[in-house]
Amino acid sequence: MKNSLAILFAVIYSALNLFAVDALPAIPAVSLKTIDTKLSTSQTHRVELAKGWNMVSVPGYDTINMSELFSNSTYVNVVYYFDPSINNYTSYMPHNTSSQLTSIKPSQGIWVYANIAFSLTFNASVDPAYSSSSSSSLISTSSNSTSSSSSSVTSSQSSSSSTAANLNSARLIADYNFNNSLADTLNPDSVLQTLNTKFVDNAIYSNGIYRSTFASDTIENGSYIITPVLENFSYDNFTINLRFKPLDTGTILVGGTDYRWFFVNSGYSNSLEIYFNNYSDSFTISNANVKSNEWNTLIISVDTNNKKVITYLNDVKLEDITLPSTFKYEVVNSSQKENDKKFTFSNFSSGLQFKGYVDYLKIYNGSLTN
């Protein structure tokens, strides 16, 4: 029988530089938000870490060895834990065999500096007492109180805005990490359809040459990336989380191959363009600053019930978009309502194709909670 629990953690995306390995911990002074992930007692557990600082707590019964938790040593630079018994930090560094911090106990909070965004996976026997109905959390978003193991960390928090979007009410339904695989990590049988792409350093490369999916299309070297139909996808409330490195302006991500019911472009003069219903409803966010030939993290949350679109770019909250009071998707009244529940990096209306690299694409049912 599966029991659920909550891994309570806050993802802190920071612009801090790496510090010297023998320096005191440069813990970021930021406000924290909590993200709940419901997990089963019978599966491998996964926590999504952002590049930069992350605070992680692992509820359960088992003490976990740091070398097992961070088995891929290239992803993590340093881990800190505030030990109240010595009133100071202890640290773990993957390449330092004399690290003082060798294990983590259930519910202890650790600061993790990730060199890249990645999925932290672990096996543990979990405590059924930790459930999504629990009112307790290691990290508080509204006060300076926390567990004794990290009280000194919390006391240094400032009132600066959090650099992490709160996906507390959203449910991850598709997760493509492109680590030499086209499969959805949540459902290995759900595989992307691609043409003329390649994996480069745990990312997928699209060459920007448009080609349709029609067999009669003979454009040489044309490429595309298309998700399978997302059967449980909700048009009304969804969130996409994308890390990408564009080599040109133009198409970034498109919802639907037939109706193009949603898509986002990087425009000129640092703008971000968001469209619905194949250009019928268009919105431009000025000074968004999509960085060319650099990694960008884009989160867009659409709530058609409340006529609201929330956008984060590189952990900066952009201006909200208000949809018209009469807004509705054209696709929902069509015969393609179910078949068009997919995402692609090609705009099959304009004939434009994303050019660049994609590190991951995550799709959620549910909208962001501000």
Image (tube, grey):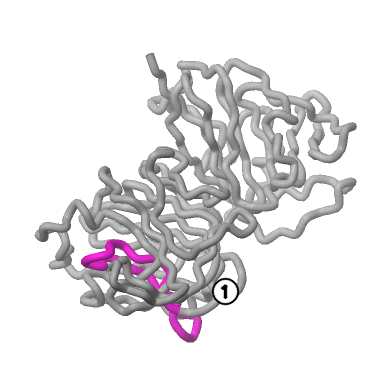
**Left or right of residue 291: residue 284:** left
Q: Which residue does the numbered mark 1 point to in the structure image?
A: 291
* 353 sits left or right of 157 in the view: left
User: Taking 142 as reference, is 85 left or right?
Assistant: right
Residue placed most toward the observer, 247 or 41: 247
Q: Give the camera-side residue of 102 and 344.
A: 344
Q: Is residue 329 left or right of residue 121?
A: left
Depicted 63 relative to depicted 304: above or below: above
What residue do we see at 77% from left, 50% from top? 26
Residue 278 occupies which quadrant of the picture? bottom left
The magenta stretch is 250-271
- Res. 187 in view: yes
User: How packed is label 1: few (under 14 Cα within 10 Å), some, or many (20 or more)?
Assistant: some
Q: Residue 6 location, x and y as percent?
A: 47, 29
Q: Which residue does the image show at 11% across and 60% down from the upper left?
A: 334
Viewer-side residue, 50 vs 45:
45
Q: Amino acid at mark 1?
A: Lys
- Where's residue 214, x and y in %? 28, 68
Q: Secondary structure at mark 1?
A: loop
Is residue 138 inside the magenta stretch?
no
Q: Is residue 268 magenta?
A: yes
**Which quadrant does the N terminus fall into?**
top left
